[in-house]
Image (cartoon, coloured by chain):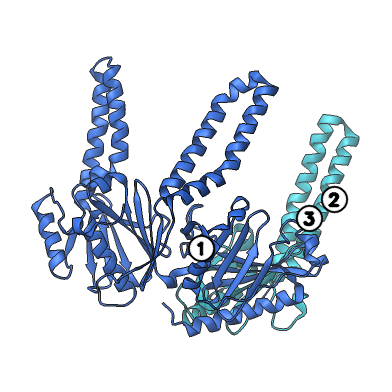
Amino acid sequence: MTEDPEHAKSPEHPGSTEDTKSSEAAAAVARVGWHRLHPLSPLINAGRLLSGVVGIFALSLVTADGYKGYLYQLIVAAGLVVTGFVRWLVTRWKLDGATLRIETGLLRRDSRQLPMTRIQAVDVVRPFLARVLGLAALRIRLAGAGNAGDRLAYLTVGEAARLRATLLAGHHGLDPVTPEPVELLLITVPAGLVIGATLLRAAPRFLALAAIAAVAATAAPGIFLASESTLGLIALGLVTRTWRQVTGRYGFTVATAPDGIRIRRGLLSTVAETVPFRRVQAVRLVQPLLWRPFGWCWLVVDVAGVAGRDSGPRSGGLTKTLLPVGYMNEAQHLVGLVFGHDIPELTKPPKRARAKAPLSYHFLAAGHNRLMAVTVTGRVGKKTVYMRLEKLQSVRLTQGPVQRKLSLASVHGDAAGRRAHAVFSDRDADQARRLLDELADLSRSARSAESPS
Amino acid sequence: MAVNASPGWMVPSARLWRMRLTQVAAAGPVLVMIAGVAAGIWAGASAAAVAAAIVAVAAGFLLWVERRRYLAWGYREREEDLIVSRGVLVRRVSVVPYGRMQFVEVTAGPFERVFRLATVQLHTAAAASDARIPGLEKDEAARLRDRLATLGEARAAGL
């Protein structure tokens, strides 16, 4: 599950000689000219679909009623292989100074230029099949480049690691041939903790489902039989979801390097993510109800993504888990790492706010200093948002009818993306007015202090 | 927060109010008639009168709401940022620094075109930013657009 540089240095190349040549050249000299992806890429890309097709194929062999169905499967499979191969054939990439260029498409050429300075995050993604074959995909996220990001799928592991180092060095304005800096391992999340915490969070859902099933079975057995399959499907969905969460967070490690935070995770498919420190828009610390007795919490970073009217519902902002489950001191250490240790003091909103927000008043708190804002909200789970003021995109004040009666107002700070959002909830109205201007001013001075990137 | 009275604040064109009035005036009688006729066919003349009255009162209420909403709009160009204030029931004040602007959008729907109006909207990288100013006169919209674009370029900051 960890990266294997030794293995990567001796890449097996069952592919064309041209590819072998190009990767040797890449290893030796600075990487110039066009490169192809690894020739096994189409196989992995089609992997999931192909296994389905093969399954249907096998099924049709067993229940064979002539060659017709047989032929059909064969055509589909062949079509998949051919399109995958053509796609591989027409895809190439090149490092052009401080820009990564990716060209693809047979009929409609699609040429992308990814300037290194605008990179938000670089991930090395390795699905199970790719790990078996010693390959990895590189996923590069730019602000405004859409949800999926641009993928180079697949490269050999060593090539992917080198390219990532080059991209990140370019991002920080260093010489592209700078080797990858040494990283410092900070936190390893034990497997038991991941499994326990994930199960604990899923438990209420399973219980609710079981309760519904039990009630239905006793109250109306007839209806229960009819709805059994639906309940079964929901249960299956829950199990799959929990399984995915466990496998996705298995072996979670957080490391820090001069070029950003490194996250590694995954049981079958592994992902290695790098988030440059300065790309962090906000950090959210969440303490769900059931986790609080154990002192567990979970930490998420928001990185800039697209926003605006043309973006789909799933785009906009990129969220990465920084710590799937951990203790408060670990989380605070990570927050300190990202934001420095000058965390502002929190103050509670005035007592009269309890009338407006009776269910969340116990958590509400907020504070800011010259560089950052911290806000706490939540009803059942406690949610703390840390945001650097220099990242503020806009500041808003809202005042609903009840708040107006009580002379309260909320101030919102928005960072890039859809979810990065800090709320100074239910503050005194006059204080909120002042806060609105103050945050705008502080954000500006923080921005000019930090050179624009 | 009597925005319109304070100096430095700008408000949408008076034609925006006329547009809203026209919209309600055009749709109101039609709805009253439809409600009256439908209720008349279904339940007789007295029901028709009641239904028509209800719809008429609703239209009047809508007019009142629109009037107050129209009066609540205001914007102000400050040195470094644009403030937009709006809303009656929920009051909202947005501050958007020029440097954070990604692009300016000027739109004019069919009604707005008839009244020679346009809506200017500022987009930032944050989805929640909602700096929109409706009902600006064509020239003012163009002026604001150009000014915002110039200021945005001069003060542009990275994400």
Vertical order, A243 against A356 (above or below): above
Kind of residue at disc 2: Val
Q: Relative to the observer, which residue lies in front, A401 or B72?
A: A401
Which residue, as the protein is rendered here, is positioned at the far top?
A65
In the image: residue A443, left or right of residue A158: right
Q: Nearer the viewer, residue A54 or B81?
A: A54
Can you tell which of label 1 and label 2 is closer to the viewer? 1
Q: Residue at x 59, y 73 (%)?
A: A373
Chain B: its colour in the image is cyan
Name the residue beneath numbered marker 3. Answer: B62
For the residues labelled 3 and 1, the Cα–Cα distance comes to 35 Å
Local secondary structure at mark 1: loop
Residue at point 80% right, 36% down?
B37
Q: Is residue A381 above or below residue A448?
A: above
Q: Position of residue A344 (x, y in %)?
A: 60, 76
Going by the image, does A420 lie left or right of A39? right
